[in-house]
Image (spheres, rainbow, N blue to C red):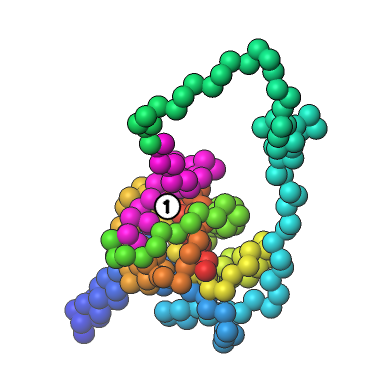
Amino acid sequence: MKFVSIIIVLLLTVNLLGGCMSAPEETRPDASVADIGNEPNGNELPAAELVFRPKARPQLPEYPDVTRKPDAETSDNGLGPKNPPPSDSAPAPDAPPENPEPAPNPEEPKEETGGLSQQEKQMLELVNAERAKVGVAPLKLNMEVTEVARVKSKDMLENNYFEHQSPVYGSPFEMLSTFGINFSTAGENIALYHDVTAAHQGLMNSPGHRENILREEFSQLGIGIIKAADGRLYITQLFIG
């Protein structure tokens, strides 16, 4: 009987030790997605999808018109008067060349990413590269949403949690509404890695996170990356459409 009791104790010890093991780097197992039109059934995140309708979404702040006005001394936005007085000493204009060179095509406007850190910019490029592979339009950077994503990453670091539900701001969708972000559909991915490339690969290997990255309904993205003292990166991706 003593021999049997010893075996049972050993088995219980092995099971208990096995349940305490955890991976050093991870992504949140289930991505959060919100489609306006349904209420959540509770405060807990469902296994696959979180649906949320914000009660009130404040309008985005209005910004003053900063369009440059014409100078007082000019009549056409700084180009000079329409009909300047003739000048007796003005030379005759040169004849136009027989074969003028065509004007160069204007360059496509490039998306402004100057407000991103190098790691955040890298993550944006990786996300849009994945969308290009499957023929989905790239996500446009939204700096207001990026600021919210940074607050979320900092909140996770400072309050020592790794969840979609913040003890301070609530769900990602409540948080977006609190910060005055208007959206019809929204989603959040979070990751905790030492490296941006590894974090991106981990997200793409998870069906829920991959769906957020490639979802056609999303048109804008905010990325917030905060580095912890141990070198790990708290990464938040906030998608809106």
Q: Is residue 87 visible?
A: yes
Relative to 239, 53 lies left or right = right
Q: What is the span of residues highlighted in magenta in the rendered image? A: 103-132
Q: Is residue 229 magenta?
A: no
Q: Residue 200: x, y in percent? A: 35, 56
User: Residue pushed farthest left?
Assistant: 3
Q: Tell which of 172 and 57 is nearer to you.
A: 57
* Residue that extends furthest to the right in the rendered view of this protein: 72
Residue under label 1 = 124
User: Residue 93, located in which quarter of the rendered image?
Assistant: top right
Residue 66, compared with residue 61, is above or below; it is above
Give the amino acid type for the residue marked by disc 1 in the picture.
Leu
Secondary structure under tag 1 reads: helix
In the foreground, 97 or 1: 97
- Residue 146 drawn at (x, y percent): 55, 54
Closest to the observer, 9 or 36: 36
Residue at 78% x, 29% y: name it: 73
Residue located at (45% from left, 59% from top):
139
Q: Residue at x 47, y 68 (%)?
A: 218
Where residue 44 appears, x then y in whole percent? 54, 79
- Indicate the quadrant containing the N terminus: top left, top right, bottom left or bottom right: bottom left
Residue 74 position within the rendered picture, expressed as x and y whole percent measured from the top left: 75, 32
